Amino acid sequence: MELSKRQEAILEIVKKEGPITGEQIAERLSLTRATLRPDMAILTMAGLLEARPRVGYYYSGKTPNKVIAEKLHRIKVGEVKSVPVVVSEHCSVYDAVVTMFIEDVGTLIVVREGGILEGVISRKDLLKITLGGQDIHKLPVGVVMTRMPNVITVGPDDSVWLAAKKLITHEVDALPVVRPVEGGDKNKDLEVIGRLSKTNITRLFVELGEGN
Ligand code: ADP
């Protein structure tokens, strides 16, 4: 975040003298309170300054990057996830390719009865198998998918930052969003409740950039 010269001057004053009232800041800068109002609003909204009624402004101690980091840790996967596009592991490779086109996704999630996670299939998994010259109408996706327990997942209450970190670290395009099944094996029985892809992260990035 780029601060104007005046905003930087305000920050310096508050750092040294805070808590300090808007009136006093205006005096130090030989300006009116009305002139300063937009700057104070920006600095407060950005999280650099905090305001307390009848006390005044004080410095939050946060750098602009820290404010952004906090925001990204606060936004939950559940708020930005998409609906999962799922198939069964008996689905043919041919039908999986068709589903990818129809649903306009790059990753299919493989589930068994009850929506329990079994695996994931990416575009390249499907491309690779088509090179083998086998009958893709007969071949089930179960033979090409990445299977549990090797699937990287996130939970709805995890932060989007953690999800983005997993996408980058594991070099994958999407993560199933899951929750443990009640009464099931906590690590094995995961119910798929969404899909988090690089597109979700990019969309959020654009929205944050628009100041929403
Ligand atoms: P693409 O193959 O289109 O580049 P990915 O980078 O997502 O797409 O997939 C690369 C490999 O990682 C594929 O073999 C795929 O099955 C696997 N994969 C995709 N998503 C996951 C995931 N969430 N967890 C584990 N493996 C995954």
Image (cartoon, grey):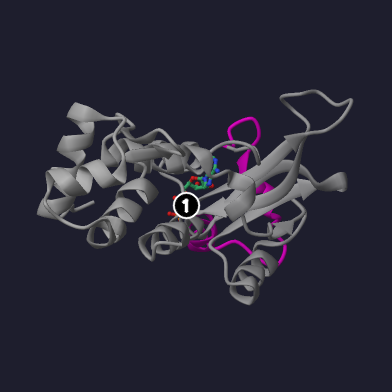
Residue 90, percent across and down? 77, 54
Closer to the camera, 152 or 95?
Answer: 152
Closer to the camera, 166 or 158?
Answer: 158
Q: Single out the residue that lies furthest toward the bottom.
A: 102
State whether residue 72 is above or below residue 126.
Answer: above
Q: Which residues are magenta?
A: 125-152
User: Is 137 a magenta residue?
Assistant: yes
Q: Residue at x 81, y 47 (%)?
A: 115
Q: Secondary structure at mark 1?
A: loop
Task: Bin the neighbour count of mark 1 within 10 Å (Cα to Cα): few under 14, some 14-19, many 20 and up.
Answer: some
- Seen in the image, is 2 located left or right of residue 131? left
User: Is 119 a magenta residue?
Assistant: no
Q: Residue at x 74, y 36 (%)?
A: 179
Which kind of residue does numbered mark 1 sit on? Asp
Q: Residue at x 58, y 43 (%)?
A: 76
Residue 29, percent across and down? 12, 48
Quarter where residue 59 is shown:
top left
Closer to the camera, 88 or 185?
Answer: 185
Quarter where residue 15 is shown:
top left
Closer to the camera, 163 or 153?
Answer: 163
Circle 1 residue: 173
Q: Residue at x 73, y 45 (%)?
A: 192
- Seen in the image, is 14 located left or right of residue 48? left
Q: Is mark 1 within 8 Å of ligand 1?
A: yes
State whether residue 19 is above or below residue 128.
Answer: above
State whether residue 52 is above or below residue 193.
Answer: above
Residue 134 visible here: yes
